[in-house]
Image (cartoon, grey):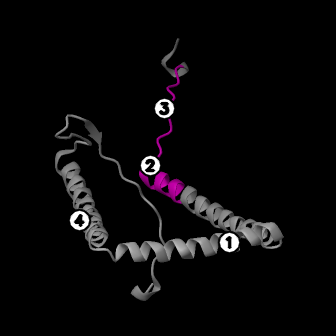
Amino acid sequence: MDEDDQTIVKPKQVDSAELVLNMEGMIKNLISTLDVQKEQVTKFQEALNDIFENDETYTTHAKAAKEAARVKSNTKQQILKQPQAADLNEKVKTLKSEMSENQASLSDYLREFQKMSGISEIEGEDGELREIVYTAKLIRKSSKYGN
């Protein structure tokens, strides 16, 4: 075989700019798909709600459930006026607030830990191995910032 007869086929390399453009296209396509799906869900949900509202048995039961919920809520508020219940309710609120703050701090610490160490796992004090994961979501940019 001659050297001229040998053809070396190199795999096509996709440069990072092309990859970014492809990903941007996929993201835009998914955003459009999600927008259409949201519109469809709204339309179908409205039609379903109309069916419920036009059913006499359903509306009767819904009114009874609403009244029962009102009575339950009033009873709960009365019970929460008792010192023991009020104290426990305040403790629950305080702990939930602290947990929320601690979760936000943990998220920040994990992000920094992963950046600094390059490690995406951490073993807890209980010996359980945990993986650091992130969830990204897309939100509309507020127009109040000049956009």
Q: Which mark is residue 15?
A: 2
Residue 134 lies within the magenta run = no
The residues bearing labels 4 and 1 have C-alpha atoms spaced at a distance of 38 Å
User: In the rendering, at what x and y percent does residue 83 appear?
Assistant: 27, 73
Residue 131's image quarter? top left
Q: Residue at x 32, y 74 (%)?
A: 82
Judge from the rendering whether residue 23 lies leftward or rightward of residue 127; answer left or right: right
- How many angstroms separate mark 2 from mark 4 (CA)? 47 Å
Q: Position of residue 110 (x, y in %)?
A: 23, 52
Q: Which residue is mark 1?
A: 64
Amino acid type of the residue that numbered disc 1 sits on in the rendered structure: Ala
Q: Element under label 3? A: loop
Q: Amino acid at mark 3?
A: Lys
What residue sits 47% from the left and 70% below the top?
A: 139
- Crowdedness of circle 4 by 10 Å Cα count: few (<14), some, many (20+)? few
Instruction: State which mark lies toward you, 1 or 3.
Output: 1
| Mark 4 element type | helix
Dot label at residue 98: 4
Indicate which label's residue lies in the foreground, 3 or 4.
Answer: 4
Residue at the far top: name it.
Answer: 1
Which secondary structure, mark 2?
loop
* Residue annotated with mark 3: 10
Q: Is residue 7 above or below residue 95?
A: above
Mark whose residue sits in front, 2 or 1: 1
Q: Is residue 115 above or below residue 91?
A: above
For the record, the magenta segment spans: 6-24
Tell me which numbered mark, 2 or 4, is placed earlier along the sequence: 2
User: Along the polypeptide, which appears first: circle 2 or circle 1?
Assistant: 2
**Figure quadrant of residue 136:** bottom left
Q: Residue at x 21, y 52 (%)?
A: 115
